[in-house]
Image: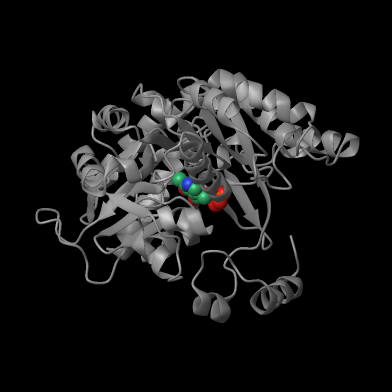
Amino acid sequence: THTENSIQELRELDKKHFIHPTSPVKQQQEQGPAFIFTEGKGVYLQDATGKKVIDGMSSLWNVNVGHGRVELGKTAMEQMSKLGFSSCFATYSNEPAIRLAAKLAQIAPGDLSATFFTSGGSEANDTAYKLARHYWILKGQPGRKKIISRTKSYHGVSMGATSATGLKAFRDFTNSLAPDFLYADNFSSQSLRELIAAEGPETIAAFIAEPVQGAGGIHVAPENYFKEVREICDEYGVLFITDEVITGFGRTGTYFGMDHYGVAPDMMCFAKGVTSGYAQLGGVMISEKIHQELTELSTGTLLHGYTYSGHPMACAVALKNLEIIEQEHLIENAEAMGQELLNGLYRIKQERKIVGKVKGLGLMAGIEIVKDLNTKERFAAPMSPAIVLEAAKQGLICRSVVLDDQDIVVFAPPLTINKDEIKKMIEILNHSISVIE
Ligand code: PLP
């Protein structure tokens, strides 16, 4: 732990020099960081003052194997010491990238068989939209440019990914977004059909959806939704892209979120859990059919590539991370502990007055905060931020989602979590809500 003076110094430096991602600007300037984390072990994080908290969000839904994994550090060190970086452009390659691409082809849904690597989820989304549009150019249908996503979706913050994000506040933040993005209702396959028909299928390149919407507040689609989406996309010749950036790699109790629905997409974006956050990596997988068509129709260079596409250290860490997920049966654990978490949240709902709907899939869960359980009326001033603040004081990190029509607290603990740790989470949360309500 640090001395009080050194912590104070860090807080001042933070306020002066560090622009925080996705954070309230004024509040950050006035208060400085609430936590300066220094280490982690399992589901716990510890800050510079020595305070320990349960990381009930796996940080950003990504530390799937939990904190403090020495074996991942060792893998990174060995790979960086041997080959820190080399290019994957054109004819260059490296073994970790090759092995990871092959491994992903084994575990991914349907016939997804080839991977384009990026450094994260936003880049993965931009890559998917660009590949989809390029595909249609090669197929002689350049008019197919529009990307349809869903209301309440979140796809990242690069220009393309923000444009596809259904959460309007993110788009309004910069009012100069890419054209050709449209939003279907998040729960209605009929709305997708109507949108494609109204715009003209010959103008639509792809439809993209998260298997379970995360940042929009844990929205699990109706049972037949994705089956119907697949049929509609096939009927109109629209590519179906899944954004598994949160739901991939065990989060929902199956390897990928789409495994729950038995539906195979044409492309899949991934990031986060592929390395459990130990290295910056994402990517897009494409089906064998599209890979073949792209190869056959291509006449020149694939003019899309990041310096760090196929980064050897990130790919080596990913391979080790997937080995841990499989060897420790973390996907099965996510399913079992997801049930445990939901049960705990239902118990809280019985005891507290302001908890409405409880929802989740695997270790992605959320509770709606309502003023009136019967009418589902919300508080004029959202309550979830105060609950999250209180929970953090009490030793649990969770996240609040406040939208026009929603006031939600969400959870996504590491897939390594056990029954006792879930019990602790539930106790802290229950107490925190009792303080606020
Ligand atoms: N897609 C989804 C579903 C996400 O939840 C996120 C990030 O939270 C992203 C894309 C963007 O990923 P990144 O922040 O790595 O760019």
Q: Position of residue 335 (x, y in %)?
A: 42, 27
Left or right position of 9 against 165: right
Tell which of 330 and 233 is nearer to you: 233
Tell which of 311 and 317 is nearer to you: 311
Q: Quadrant of the N terminus?
A: bottom right
Tell which of 393 and 71 is nearer to you: 71
- Location of residue 297 (image quadrant): top right
Left or right position of 431 against 45: left
Q: Do we see residue 214 in this rendering? A: yes
Tell which of 422 and 388 is nearer to you: 388
Determine the residue positioned at 59% across, 69% down. 33
Q: Position of residue 409 (x, y in %)?
A: 36, 54
Left or right position of 379 against 334: left
Q: Seen from this angle, which residue lies furthest right?
A: 82
Identify whether 285 is placed above or below 34.
above
Q: Position of residue 164 (x, y in %)?
A: 41, 53
Q: Seen from this angle, which residue lies furthest left?
A: 374
Q: Position of residue 206 (x, y in %)?
A: 39, 40
Identify whether 81 is placed above or below 59.
above
Determine the residue positioned at 65% across, 45% down. 303
